[in-house]
């Protein structure tokens, strides 16, 4: 048997979760609604949306050279992030991962005009995907904070990574909207004006 065959998942179902629990890396079995599991699931959903964003970038070829490799790297880090959540006591997300996001954020934000108004999610399909990733990153961040508030040990860089990722996606939504159709600015209703 080769090394690849020994480490391959050959059986996908285990039946160990049939009663509503799942296992963590520290051997605990917890409810599938446990705060840590909710966070893991939301990070998985977030990673899936990053994959859709990458696919949309490949399809449109808009900013493909600038964004494909960094977004693929983000997918790998999100997988690490989920792994860290699944293995209490381990740290996989490092501060330099957060710094990498900040560098990318600064790079894309430097040429954008200052915001004088709120923007709506839209402008192009690509921008909408960026906004979806942004909002799910915020939800993942809330789920991680809920786990921390419930007494789970969460490393600070993990929370920072999700926070910066949502900021980055806001900036990328602006960039892609401006490249492919224009940002949609929020217009205050006359009834709401002071």
Image (cartoon, rainbow, N blue to C red):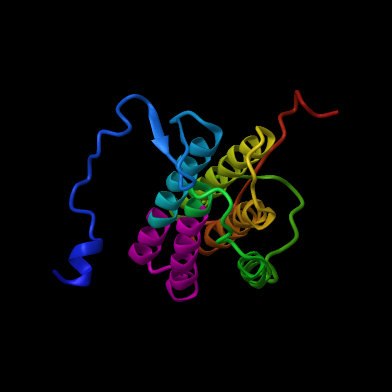
Please determine whether, in this image, residue 111 is positioned above or below residue 140: below
Residue nearest the observer in this picture, 24 or 130: 24
What secondary structure is the magenta-colored segment mainly?
helix
- Is 24 part of what is drawn in magenta? no
Left or right, 26 with respect to 104, comes to left
Residue segment shown in magenta? 52-81
- At x 40%, y 30%, the residue is 21
- At x 44%, y 76%, the residue is 65
Left or right, 113 with respect to 15, comes to right
Residue nearest the observer in this picture, 142 or 40: 40
Residue nearest the observer in this picture, 106 or 138: 138
Please determine whether, in this image, residue 83 is positioned above or below residue 65: above
Q: Position of residue 129 (x, y in %)?
A: 46, 50
The part of the image, by quadrant, that contains residue 93 is bottom right
Q: Position of residue 110 (x, y in %)?
A: 70, 71
Image quadrant in which the C terminus is located: top right
Left or right, 162 with respect to 2, comes to right
- At x 40%, y 63%, the residue is 57
- At x 33%, y 63%, the residue is 59
The part of the image, by quadrant, that contains residue 101 is bottom right
Residue that lies at the very extreme toward the bottom in this rendered image: 65
Residue that lies at the very extreme toward the right in this rendered image: 194
Image quadrant in which the N terminus is located: bottom left
Residue nearest the observer in this picture, 97 or 194: 97
Left or right, 80 with respect to 6, comes to right
Count up the numbered dots. 0
Q: Position of residue 45 (x, y in %)?
A: 43, 44
């Amino acid at each position: 048997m080769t090394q690849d065959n020994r480490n391959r998942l050959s059986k996908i179902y285990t039946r160990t979760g049939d009663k509503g629990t799942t296992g963590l890396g520290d051997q605990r079995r917890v409810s599938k609604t446990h705060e840590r599991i909710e966070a893991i699931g939301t990070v998985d959903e977030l990673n899936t949306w990053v994959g859709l964003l990458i696919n949309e970038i490949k399809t449109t070829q808009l900013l493909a050279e600038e964004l494909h490799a960094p977004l693929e790297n983000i997918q790998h880090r999100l997988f690490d992030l989920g792994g860290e959540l699944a293995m209490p006591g381990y740290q996989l997300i490092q501060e330099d991962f957060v710094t990498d996001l900040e560098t990318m954020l600064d790079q894309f934000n430097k040429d954008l005009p200052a915001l004088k108004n709120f923007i709506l999610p839209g402008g192009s399909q690509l921008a909408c995907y960026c906004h979806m990733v942004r909002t799910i990153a915020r939800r993942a961040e809330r789920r991680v904070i809920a786990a921390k508030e419930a007494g789970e040990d969460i490393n600070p860089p993990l929370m920072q990574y999700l926070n910066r990722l949502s900021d980055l996606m806001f900036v990328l939504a602006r960039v892609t909207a401006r490249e492919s159709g224009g940002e949609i600015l929020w217009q205050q209703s006359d009834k709401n004006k002071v």
